[in-house]
Image (cartoon, coloured by chain):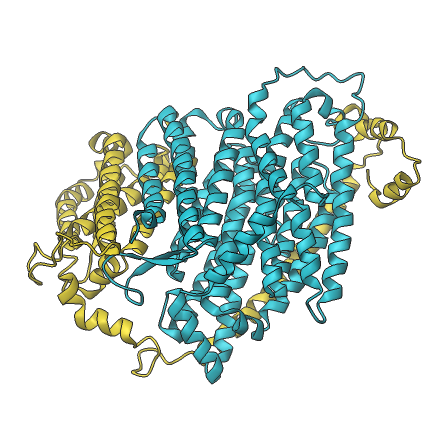
Chain colours: A yellow, B cyan
Amino acid sequence: MRNEKGLFRRWLNGQVDWSAMLEQDTPAAATTAAAETVPYHPHHDMASARRAIRCGQKAYTVLAIVLCLIFSAFMLLTVANLPSYGSDSAPTVNEVAERYVEKGTEETGAVNTVAGMILDYRAFDTLGESFVLFTAMCAVTMLMNVPGKRRVRKLDQDTMDYYQDPIIRTVCKLVIPIILMFGIYILLNGHLSPGGGFSGGAIMASALIIYALVWGGERASRAIPAKALRIIVLCALGFYACSKTYSFFTGANHLHSIISPGTPGRILSAGLILPLNVAVGFVVCCTMYSFYMYFRRGEL
Amino acid sequence: MSFVQNFPFFSIILCLLCAVATFVAGDRWGRRLTIGLLSVSIVLQSCVLWFCASNNTSYAYMMGHYPAPWGNEIAAGIIEPLMALLFSVVLLLSVLGGMDHILKDIPADRHHLYWSMVDLTLVSLLALSYTNDIFTGYVFIEICTIASCALLSAKDTGRTLIASVRYMVFALVGSGLFLIGVIFTYSITGHLLFPQLHETIAALWAEGTYRFSMTVAIGLMTAGLAIKSGLFPFHFWMPDTYGRATPASSGILSGVVSKAYILLLIKVIYRAVGIEVFAASGIQSVLLIFGIAGMIVGSVSAIRSKRLTTMVAYSSAAQIGYIYMGLGMGTQAALLAAFLHIFSHALTKPMLFLSASQLADASGGHMDFPSLQGAGHRNVTAGVLFTAGALSMVGVPLFIGFIPKLQFASAAFELTWQKWPVLLALAISTLLNVLYFLYTAMVLWLPQKDNAAFCPQERRWIASAPAMVLLAIGLVIGIHSAPLTALLQQGFALFCQY
């Protein structure tokens, strides 16, 4: 069916016998036996194909460079036309930012305005963001999970056995608890100082990744079983969604909420922000750790 | 506040909880949960739609204790629950119709993850329908992107993986451009919620300050969403993406996911930027040109394709072109036509993909046209469904595809210089549609080949039931389109006033 338009004209004139046409087409398209009837020159075809590919690649490179130049020129022009960053007269310094900065601590109870903003004022966005992480985790699990079949890769044999090295082993034994501690501190102190769930979770995950790197994936799997990770994620996200349901529901229906900001500056203050930070931190930690394990080992 | 007004928010939270529960639960419970969730979502959206339509009201729903410029918000009028209802219905029917293939194509240990991804796709679709905040829109675009890539790559074959990598690259470029656009918009206006953005942008445009950056920002957001929904010349990910995935995923991706991006774009154009500014920025005309080009190029590519699903996928590119042409025309009649086309395409495409896969099953799993000769005789239900879908796509009266084409044509007469290009494009595109859809339909109903060595399939009538429901909805709208048109028009009046 190469020349569809000619075909169409003939079809309009009633000259087309469809069955015959298809009979004629079938061998070329479907069966391998028909390949003999078509003259086939592998070398000629390969050479022309290679030439075409080379030309295509050259054209592609040139076009890509031109496109990038045009795009960057546009971007630079736009940035030049934007209001200057950080100035008093910038449009971003408006009633929105004003209230976040001036009333943020009073209304949310969080000394760290950023935490108050992302976990209280705009909590729905952050709920979405933590589900972005969850989605990514599911997608990676779907693609990379090869349970049972240990994918022994060249990488595994070539890398040094870190566990045998006394310096690395000793230093890691010392450092991992400190990193974990630091991560937990950032997590719990998110409403009082810079930090919070995302950064604290990432730091905690780095401790777990170091453990898996030095002591090997198998031992890490035994220490942190896949099921436990799953349950942690379930609890963290479930808690996040449920507590925010309460907060959104009372907010939208103008009901009284039992969550109070507390005394700003105390560790147990800022209402839901502290537990939400912990939940987000666990989700981030599990996501990063499972990414490492899947890419490295193929299973949790 | 009436209790029904909580339902958009309930449906979103319910999806999130179900997605997490499905991730932990096994395959069977995951499936039950997902199908239950989709059904519940249909009920909830219908309630909201009924509430808003009968009271002729729209409302903004505070997500938290802080009002509009400070906190997040979702909004519901008539358009939003209507689209959410459409998305839920199509998602449910695609999943039910493609169930056999989901169980067959996807490795068993991935089933619960697949269901989790369906839940997450639903939540992103609902959130994109209801959002009243441009950054919330971006967050759920991210979820939608990742989830749809996973829906695609769940079928573990080489070609699907290549297709999903390609889809991911295009989708990420789209998200990136959209995000840059959002950042520019924010730094010019200082707002993220649609009503505030609308006011500020209108004031800035009248004043004439930052006009260039504003134009670039609008252009970037439009381009980002256009790439993600597959407007020409960014439709090259379509054939592999839609053509190689498991039929349920093809139906979901082509039927609803691309429409959700278009819906967000419509919200950005009409609610955030404002149609006057959008028209004055010149991007509207660009959309019109690319839409028309997409209609023609998509159809030509469909004619040249050798596989059934590839052809159906390329035809999606053409149909997306129609919708963008409607947005490019810029009048309310054209917007109505674009919405009707979203309905028509969302209801017809999954049906085509589902019946195409059944026809291929009846032809030994082959998708090329010679093998499909006479497939309609081997699986009569699927053949009839595909033919009906093809007729609808062509725009034969009585089928749903006729309604938007009629609306497009009548909307074109209100325009000035755009009148003739639009009418010409409609005529050419319809002719090209006839060429490839009718050709396919005829191939299906030719006499079977004598030497056909295809094993007769055990025919399960029930397997075609979801596609039949899609056809029935399409026929009802096609025969009696006045209620839907009236509802949409009532919705437009509410769409821009909050």
The picture quadrant where one finds residue A239 is top left
Q: Is residue A271 left or right of residue B370?
A: left
Q: Quadrant of the C terminus of chain A?
A: top left
The picture quadrant where one finds residue A173 is top left
Q: Is residue A191 left or right of residue B242?
A: left
Against B481, residue B374 (above or below) is above
Residue A58 location (% of width, % of height): 66, 58
Q: Is residue B223 left or right of residue B51?
A: right
Is residue A42 something that shows in the picture? Answer: no
The residue that appears at 53% across and 50% down in the rendered structure is B259
Residue B111 location (% of width, % of height): 42, 29
The picture quadrant where one finds residue A156 is top left
Q: Is residue B6 left or right of residue B238?
A: left
Is residue B471 something that shows in the picture? Answer: yes
Q: Quadrant of the N terminus of chain A?
A: top right
Residue A101 location (% of width, % of height): 20, 71
Against B169, residue B43 (above or below) is above
Against B455, residue A34 (above or below) is below
Residue B439 location (% of width, % of height): 78, 37
Seen from the viewer's position, the closer of residues A298 and A233 is A233
